[in-house]
Every structure is written in structure tokens, then in C-alpha cells.
Image (cartoon, rainbow, N blue to C red):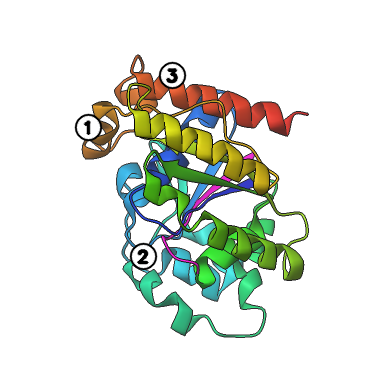
Amino acid sequence: MRTIAVINQKGGVGKSTTALAIGAGLSLKGYSVLYVDLDAQGNLSYTLGATTKGYNALGVLQRPETAKEEIQHTEQGDIIASSPSLAGADTVITETGKEYRLKEALESLSGEYDYCIIDTPPALGILTINALTACRGAIIPAQADIYSLQGISQLNSTIETVKRYCNRDLSIMGIVLTRYSSRSIISREVAEMLEQTAEQLHTKLYKAKIRECTAIKEAQATKQNIFSYAPKSNATADYKALVDEIIGEETK
């Protein structure tokens, strides 16, 4: 099972939307996908129609052996759902080896799915560290505004620390630009700066740029992924191109 974490400590950059779109795009290509929602806000779980009552992802982190029991099967895919109690994870998950809980849980499911897509909270705490320890690669969504450039270096510092102590195989797969408008000067300037940032981090800016599209918010409101809600939209074309890039990397 190939595990990908979608990560950014800044909120509002399209992280949950991107996690769902990547998983949905992979599913459409015939891959089996498991979602893990580590964000207490539960946006991914909401869109998939999963219940956030009970232990869910927090329960898995406390008792990794219960991972299979916590999987919910929805019409849009299988998910270990969020729980509001994840907000207190840093004070609850304190035992030795706390960074490896999700990795242990997912290893028990390794033969069940082709891909695992992890949605992470907008913070660099124990939940994000668990996601980075469990995955092979991280994808960073960055909104096409100047604030998105701030914090990516801090995020890279966390990734390098996890790589040094917990997961030597971890890498940044790439940065994906969201809410992009080719007509906007600032969007084009941010894209150029992110190209430079990606080079400094020994990664890349994905060629696929996710254009600003009202269909994304409409899909969220109707609890659908962008592929099923608006198959001919710009965002669908962009996310399809992103998924093609990801698969291309995996098959090299």
C-alpha cells in the first residue's frame, strides 16, 4: 500500500479538497483507496458521509490493532474518519513510540488497499508527525497567494526532522498550486516563487495547477467529489492531470 500525506499547517489551502480529489481520481483509475482523516474539523469525513461520532481515527492512534474495525465503508470510499476529540490528541497520545501509532495501524492493512490518502490538520503536532511517519511521500497544497509561501520552510523543517528520526524513506513528492488564475498577476508570481521554493526543498511544483472553480465548493456542499459532481469542470481536468502525474511518479 502506497501512503500519501496531504499536508500544510496553513488552513484554507484546499488540503481536504485535494486529498479527496487525489483519492477519487485514483479510484476512477481502478485503484483501491483508503482515506484517513486526521483533521478534527472532519471536512473529508463529512464529504464522504462518514460519521465522526465515536473514537474513529483517535481510537486507531490509541489502539492501532483496532484499525480494521474503525474503517467505514461509504459510497465514495473507505475511510478511517475524523473525530472532534482529535483536537486534544497532543495531550492524549503521550506514550513512548507515539509517533509510530498510525504507521503500525496501516501496516496491518497493507494488503487491503493500493493507496492510503491521509488528510492532516493545519498544525505541526503529533497527528501530522504520525502521518509523516506512516507515509512514503507528502504532497503540499499551496494557495496562489503570497501567504502560502510563508511557513513552507517551517513545514520542511518538520519533514526533515521526521525523516531523520522516524522515517528515512519520507520525501516531499511535490507542491500543488490551488485556486490558481492564469489571469492574475499575483497567481503567476506566486507560481514562479513556488518553483524556486520547490527547487530549494529538492522537490517540484506539479505541472497541474488547480484553477479557481466554483464547482469545488458546490461539490463540497452536496457531499460529492469533484469528478462525480462536475466531470467537465476546469478543476476536474486539473485534478485528473495531478493524479496522472502522481501515478507517473509511482510507476517510475
Distance from label 2 to label 3 (Cα)? 32 Å
Q: Mark 2 near mark 3, Cβ–Cβ under 8 Å?
A: no
Q: Which amino acid is tagged 3?
A: Ala
Q: Position of residue 234 (x, y in %)?
A: 36, 19
Seen at 66% across and 47% down, the residue is 200
Seen at 52% across and 46% down, the residue is 140
- For the record, the magenta segment spans 114-124
Point out the tag, 1 or 3, that comes first from the N-terminus: 1
Q: Could you say which disc has been placed on residue 218 in the image?
A: 1
Seen as rendered, the residue at the extreme top is 232
Q: Mark 1 near mark 3, Cβ–Cβ under 8 Å?
A: no
Please tell me which residue lies in front, 47 or 122. Answer: 122
Point out the tag, 2 or 3, that comes first from the N-terminus: 2
Is residue 102 in sight in this rendering? yes
Q: Quadrant of the C terminus?
A: top right
Point out the tag, 2 or 1, that comes first from the N-terminus: 2
Please tell me which residue lies in front, 106 or 153. Answer: 153
Above or below, comparing residue 63 to residue 119 in the picture: below
Could you say whether the residue bearing mark 1 is in a helix, strand or loop?
helix
Is residue 108 in sight in this rendering? no
Residue 42 falls inside the magenta stretch: no
Distance from label 1 to label 3 (Cα)? 16 Å
Tag nearer the camera, 2 or 1: 1
Q: Could you say which disc has been placed on residue 237 in the image?
A: 3
Q: Could you say which disc has been placed on residue 47 in the image?
A: none
Above or below, comparing residue 77 to residue 213 in the picture: below
Above or below, comparing residue 119 to residue 62 in the picture: above
193 horizontally vs 172: left or right: left
Q: Could you say which disc has been placed on residue 83 in the image?
A: 2
Please tell me which residue lies in front, 90 or 114. Answer: 90
To which quarter of the image does residue 163 belong? bottom right
Q: Quadrant of the N terminus?
A: top right
